[in-house]
Image: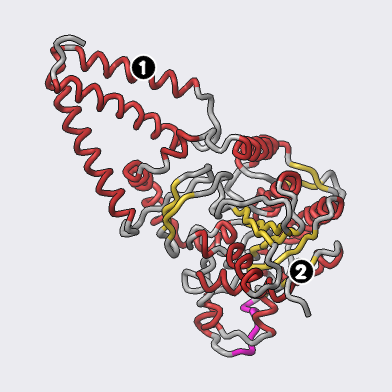
Amino acid sequence: MKGWTFEKYAVFALCLLSVGFALLCVLQILTFYTDRRLYLVFGACSLSVLLWISLNERMRLLRRGILLLATWGVLIEGTLQVVALFGLLPGVNISYPIPYSRLYWTKEGFSNGLRNSMGFHYPKSRFASDVHRVAILGDSFVEAVQVSERENLGVLLEKKLCEEKIRCETEVIGFGESGYGPAHYYELLKLVVQDSAPNEVILLFYLGNDFRNLLQEVQETPPGDYIYYRNIGESKDIELDPGSAAVVSYLGESWQRYRNRPFADLPRSLATYLISTHLVRQIPGLIANYRKVEKEDAVSRGISDFVFEDSPRDLSIKAFSLNRELLRKMADLTRDKGVRLRVVTVPFFPRAFFTAQSVADWDLRYEGYDYLSPERELANQCAAFGIDFLPMGETFRREGWTSERIEKLFFANGQGHFTPDGHQHYADVISKRWFQKN
């Protein structure tokens, strides 16, 4: 490269960085596993163009422009990284189920860290051979991006069992992912039982939306992007919706790939560390969410949801039936493997509970809705299959918890995810219920 000036070397180096940056941006946008040849072709074309710019004498002005833009880009990204390092960057939420990916969360609570080698927001598991292993499965309540990984109820449960000398040789592992529902729990349970060899499995069931997640007709997500089961003909037996087969296949492939090669998706993992691209990417979502925030809140938090109605509709009957058969499959699977299955509920409390009631003697009946009725249905289903069941809604009511005490366990004025106090309380109750000797 005879005759090259410092400017050319600097621009060429920045061009190489730009290609890498562009590749990471593409990888970040893509959600599912894609043919890596696409990235190679994109990178080769970009590098060829940038190399031509670096060598062509007529491109001096363009080179200087690239150098200026790249310098500003590095300064902006560097500033954002420093601000995020101290947890001072508001309105940014970075969360992808990829091994060793960046996690930065400010929507509810705060979290700033990394995911583990399996892509879960949980400390690295030991998988020791001489311990009593407990797996906790669930959705975003188990994923718990709203708190640090050390404040997760699974970590707190393991710590409590050891500190109080209840069962020090116990290892508790969390497998939670936002958006999961009962069909996901069953598919995930098969993988966990097969590869993690748990002695016990504790399933957290969120009454606010887990039942509705079973029904394609009330979800906005098609079978190609979500796991659904359906009835076989007119019988109660169920089968996997053919449209969801690819999702189940991807879940299994990702599990095995991450388990055997945790750095298999390293480019996508690295892409999650770029804050500036996340800020740009979040702008359309912020605008869309601003326009439909009330609708989203009503649906995602279960308000006026069909499963709470006093008079069951066809939708709720169908959801209960599908869940019952999935529980049957879970019970059969764990029984065959010698694993003990347990279910804990996460109740949903409507706004009226926190605004109108402050007494210890309460119920959750409001204008044709009974917010504890799905919990009673779930209790009957678990009893039918010999599954240990902990109804937290009924437990709160029976023990005389006031709305003020309950509100402290959840973010968003009692309607969000667990606060650190919520994780600690669930760890305490589970320990007392199932692990402490009478």
Most extreme residue toward the top, as rendered? Answer: 2
Q: Which residue is drawn at 75% across and 42% down?
A: 240
Principal SS element in the magenta part?
Answer: loop
Do labels 1 and 2 touch, CB within 8 Å? no
Q: Name the residue under label 1.
A: 45
| Residue 170 tag number | none
Q: What is the C-alpha distance between the residues marked 1 and 2? A: 58 Å
Q: Nearer the viewer, residue 430 or 438?
A: 438
For disc 1, the neighbor class at 10 Å (few under 14, some 14 to 19, many from 20) is few
Q: Which of the image's four quarters has the C terminus?
A: bottom right
Horizontal and vertical percent for residue 416? 51, 67
Amino acid carrying label 1: it is Cys
What is the magenta range?
360-367
Residue 391 picture quarter: bottom right
Q: Is residue 366 magenta?
A: yes
Residue 384, visible in the rendered structure: yes
Amino acid carrying label 2: it is Phe
Question: Relative to 295, is 170 on the left or the right?
Answer: right
Secondary-structure class at tag 1: helix
Q: Mark 2 points at which residue?
A: 389
Residue 13 picture quarter: top left
Q: Which of the image's four quarters has the N terminus?
A: top left
Secondary-structure class at tag 2: strand
Horizontal and vertical percent for residue 338? 84, 54
